[in-house]
Amino acid sequence: MHILNKKENTLLFLNRIHKLSDNFNSKKTIHLSCILIFIILSAASNNLLAQKDETEGGSGSSGTNVGTTAAAFLEIGVGARAQAMGGAFTAITQDVNSMYWNTAGIGRLSGFEATFSHIDWILDANFDYFGIATPISDIFSIGANVTIFGVGEQPVRTVQRVEGTGEFYTAQDIAIGVSLGINLTDRFSFGINAKFIDQRIWHSSATGFAIDVGAIYLTQFKGLQLGFNISNFGTDMQISGRDLLNVVDPDVLNEGVDNIPVNYETGSFALPLLFRFGISYQLDLSSISSEMTFAVDLLKPNNDQESVNVGMEYLIFDTFALRAGYRSLFLDENTGGLSLGLGLILSPSDSQFAVIVDYAYVDLGLLNAVHNFGLNLRF
């Protein structure tokens, strides 16, 4: 009996070891699979961008593609927090503004969030962003967002009437998007944001559709996250409208031919396609009730050269945040620069509700600086 008990105990011990080994190997396989998927998606997105850039004509050594894309307002980053961190936000999660930077990030939201941010942009233009997002299960999160960029009424001037004709025109760009974030595992999230784009100036307009696709991987190293995102993959945009209708005289020497109605046709332009790869690391300083987050983004656009954004955030007592960043590193003749910001989190004790007020100062080089204000609500 004693010998049999020893054998049974040995078999039971080996069986437990085998189960633990299978469980470990299973988790290891899942994590390795997530990393492989992440790498494949990143490589495919980068290759897609390279192919599109080659098809449209690369910048080459003699020039650049700056100013050759439509809907430039899509390149203005949203959220005062992200702007203060130099736009290095691709690998940051649990923020409703992730719908712009990397939709996969909303998959990690703990509850409903709403955001509004405003920028007094250059040349008296205004930039506003609205967004809401909420988890609907442990796996899925959904969201919606609206971006509005434009100027107020401007007088219509002509060569003959430089003081104005008495008419006024407006120029406004709008993007309306819906987002879906999916947690494929406890560490890997995938997201997609589909949007409708409309640009208008007086009586002419252009429309287009685009998607943003991204993923985030929470590595096994505590606090280290990887993210990638490809933005604005969609249709070309071509402006049309009654402002392009005119009357011309095709033959000034022939008096019998004049006042021929024509419709000017503009060219079509691609959207500002952008690939981002980001790394973020959050350091928990529990001894002094604070944490620090460091982030780096690598950017590859279709209308400029590659560059790097860096940023950091220092959160004290889960209440007050100090932020700094620098954008467009290693970019020749860039208009980016230093960014600084503050954040204040107001939350009643023992409550999930929070009001977050953010501010960012962003240096645009020769274009001076802009001030970004943001308000987030968490429930």
Image: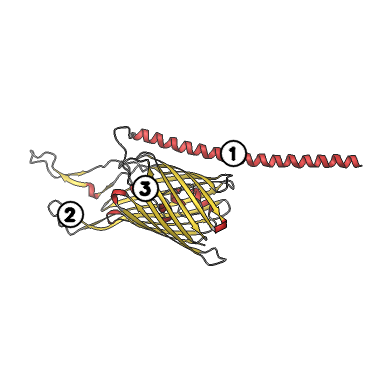
Going by the numbered disc 1, the residue's amino acid type is Leu
Q: Is residue 350 above or below residue 63?
A: below
Q: Which residue is mark 2?
A: 157
Is residue 232 among the parts visible in the rendering?
Answer: no
What colour scheme does the image use? secondary structure
Are dots 1 and 2 in contact, CB under 8 Å?
no
Q: Is residue 203 above or below residue 249?
A: below
Q: Which residue is mark 1?
A: 32
Dot 2 lies on which element?
Answer: loop
Give the foreground label among 1 and 2.
1
State the mark number for residue 96.
Answer: none
Looking at marks 2 and 3 on the same chain, the residue that comes earlier in the sequence is marked by 3
Q: Residue 319 location, x and y as percent?
A: 49, 62
State the mark number for residue 75.
Answer: 3
Q: Residue 182 location, x and y as percent?
A: 54, 48
Q: Nearer the viewer, residue 342 or 289?
A: 289
Q: CA distance from mark 2 to mark 3?
A: 30 Å
Q: Is residue 20 above or below residue 81?
A: above
Is residue 214 among the parts visible in the rendering?
Answer: yes
